Structures are given as structure tokens and as C-alpha cells.
Amino acid sequence: MKCLDCKHGVPETGQATVSFDRNNCTVIIQDVPALVCPICSAYYPDESTTQKVLDAGNAAIKNETEVEIIRLKAA
């Protein structure tokens, strides 16, 4: 598979850091397993990992945390 962003790299197994802001809360999730493009660093987590990232982020937002840094635990 070619990278969907840069169209040049071939994503490889690795880890990414995912961050997003919502409701005045910044969430940073580290060590997210994903396919990562070696050229542009675009990342592609699988569906179950994406759900874990969303669950962790939503929990931080629900707790009204201003900044949350989470290290994703391997399954």
C-alpha cells in the first residue's frame, strides 16, 4: 500500500503519537500502534486501535481534563 498522504512512501509497522483538541481539552496519546509512512509520518491505526484511542480521548474529555497525556497500553 502506498501512503495516502504523500503517495510515495510505503507505510511500515511502527508507533505514532495522536493528539487532538476538543471542548478546551488537549489530549495526547503516545505509543499508538499503526502503519507509519517513513517519508511523511502519516499514520494508519487499525480499527480496534482507533476505538481505543477514541475511548481514551473521550474519557479525558468527560473528566474535564485540560491537558491529558496517555501512553496507550498494548492489547
Image (cartoon, rainbow, N blue to C red):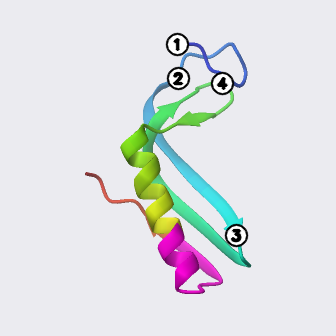
Of circles 4 and 3, the one toward us is 3
Of circles 3 and 1, the one toward us is 3
Q: Residues within 10 Å of mark 2 (few under 14, many from 20)?
A: many
Precedes in sequence: disc 2 or disc 1: 1
Q: Residues within 10 Å of mark 1 (few under 14, many from 20)?
A: few
For the residue marked with disc 1, what is the amino acid?
A: Met
Q: Assess whether mark 4 and mark 1 are in contact (beta carbons under 8 angstroms).
A: no
Residue 46: x and y in percent read 42, 37
Res. 32 in view: no
Q: Secondary structure at mark 3?
A: strand
Q: Secondary structure at mark 1?
A: loop
Precedes in sequence: disc 4 or disc 3: 3
Q: Assess whether mark 3 and mark 4 are in contact (beta carbons under 8 angstroms).
A: no
For the residue marked with disc 4, what is the amino acid?
A: Ile
Q: How far separated are the C-alphas under marks 3 and 1?
A: 32 Å
Task: Please identify the quarter of the rendering in which residue 62 is found.
Answer: bottom right
In the picture, measured across the screen, residue 38 lies left or right of residue 73, that is right
Q: Secondary structure at mark 2?
A: loop
Precedes in sequence: disc 4 or disc 2: 2
In the picture, measured across the screen, residue 64 lies left or right of residue 56, that is right
Of circles 4 and 2, the one toward us is 2
Q: Which residue is mark 3?
A: 22
Residue at left offset 74%, top offset 79%:
24
Residue 29: x and y in percent read 52, 61
Q: Which mark is residue 11?
A: 2
Of circles 2 and 1, the one toward us is 1
Precedes in sequence: disc 1 or disc 4: 1
Q: Which mark is residue 39?
A: 4
Span colored in magenta: 58-69
For the residue marked with disc 3, what is the amino acid?
A: Arg
Instruction: Tell me: residue 43, above or below residue 60.
Output: above
